[in-house]
Amino acid sequence: MRFVFVARWLVLLSSAAELVKGLLSTHPINDGLTKKHCKSKHVHRGTSRFEGDESKKDDDTRFFQELRERAQELSQQTQELTSKWRTGDCRSKLPLVFPDWVRRIDIDYPLVACGSSRETVFLGHLETGEILAESTFSIDDDESNDEARRDEKSVDDLDLMQTMRFLFGNYDGGGTLSIAFQDSLICEGGRKGGVRVWRTNPTSNRLVSQGSIPAMEGLLATCLHIDDNDRLWVGTHKGEVHCYRLDDPFQPLALQTKPYKSWTFGRRMSCVMSLELCVEFSCGVATLAGGSVEFFSTNENEAVGLASLYPPFDSMERRPANIY
């Protein structure tokens, strides 16, 4: 029995050997293992590269998708604005007549603050047509107080003349340079420099003087803006942008000897012509008389300029608008 059992195992082993031999004749073991090994490595590396490419492709897809969505949003806003201009109706049809030429205005509807050619500030109501209040200041009063203001910093005559030319060209009608109005606060920039501050009083037809900003002595405020975060923004004739706090109970504007934040752009005579802020993205844009567009950050923890842009249509050569 033992011999028969051993014989059977020998037969099975020989059969298995023949089968393995047949397989090796068609698929050599070394080449097969090498190819399998290389293929495995290749697949492994290819999968890693593929996954990286897919991840990068997904990021690019999301980025361009966000750009397309933003472009569509801006296009829709442009269409809405165009539609408003074409189909809009004037909300106020009553005449509002001031006793002096209007030089600068700022609206907090239905109220409007106007700076006149004699630097008097008027407060009017656009729906009733009434003049509600006016400032006690006029250019005549300011000239009579020149003796008392000798200790204050003054604007250089050459700087004043050059800035007026930037702002008004050859046709300067005098008066207020800039004005900002929100709630009960009115800020006004005059030709003697500085920023005067006024408050409205519902029980009086006179605006209440709150003094002027000490940090703005000797500087012309070429543009003013009050944002929704209780900040006053000032553009100056020296290419500077100042930010002042309105929410500090211990430091009202009349006591602020330096700005909360400041930016300096361009050269000494590159005055700020306009100023626009974007609260959503914490940034601002200022245009200068030299032709540059300054892009800057308004974050609480930084006050830096981000970029200086020079539009291609700006040039030193000035041509009349009627020449093509």
Image (cartoon, grey):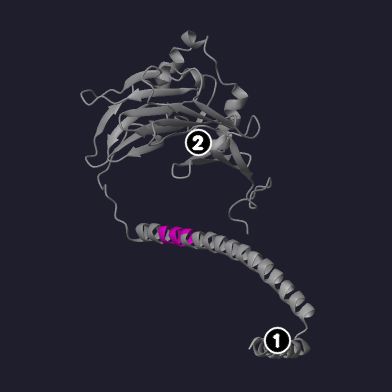
Pointer 1 local density, CA inside 10 Å: few below 14, some 14–19, many at least 20: few
Q: Nearer the viewer, residue 10 or 212?
A: 10
In the image, residue 157 sits, relative to residue 35, either above or below, namely: above
Q: Rounded to the nearest whole Å, what is the CA distance between mark 2 and mark 1?
A: 83 Å
Foreground pick, 239 / 120: 239
Taking the magenta stretch, the answer to whether it contains residue 73 is yes
- Location of residue 14 (image quadrant): bottom right
Q: At label 1, which amino acid type do we have?
A: Leu
| Image position of 166 with respect to 198: above or below | below
Q: What residue sits 62% from the left and 25% below the top?
A: 158
The residue carrying mark 2 is 299
**Residue 284's spot in the image, x, y percent?**
51, 40
Residue 92: x and y in percent read 26, 47
* Quadrant location, the C terminus: bottom right
Give the residue displayed 45% in from the left and 58% down from the top.
Answer: 74
Question: Would residue 131 be seen by someone viewing this image from the given angle?
Answer: yes
The magenta span reads: 70-77
Residue sitting farthest toward the front: 1
Question: For the residue carrying disc 2, how many other residues have a C-alpha within 10 Å: few (<14), some (14-19), or many (20+)?
Answer: few
Magenta stretch, main secondary structure, is: helix
Residue at which label 1 appears: 13
Instruction: Give the camera-side residue of 236 and 21.
Output: 21
Say which of 128 and 212 sits in front. Answer: 212
- Indicate which disc, 2 or 1, sits on the residue closer to the N terminus: 1
In the rendering, at what x and y percent does residue 182 appear?
A: 34, 33
Q: Which SS class for mark 1?
A: helix
Q: Are marks 2 and 1 in contact (CB under 8 Å)?
A: no
Give left or right: position of 211 versus 94: right
Residue type at tag 2: Asn
Q: Quick one: SS at disc 2?
A: loop
Question: Which residue: 39% across, 34% down?
Answer: 229
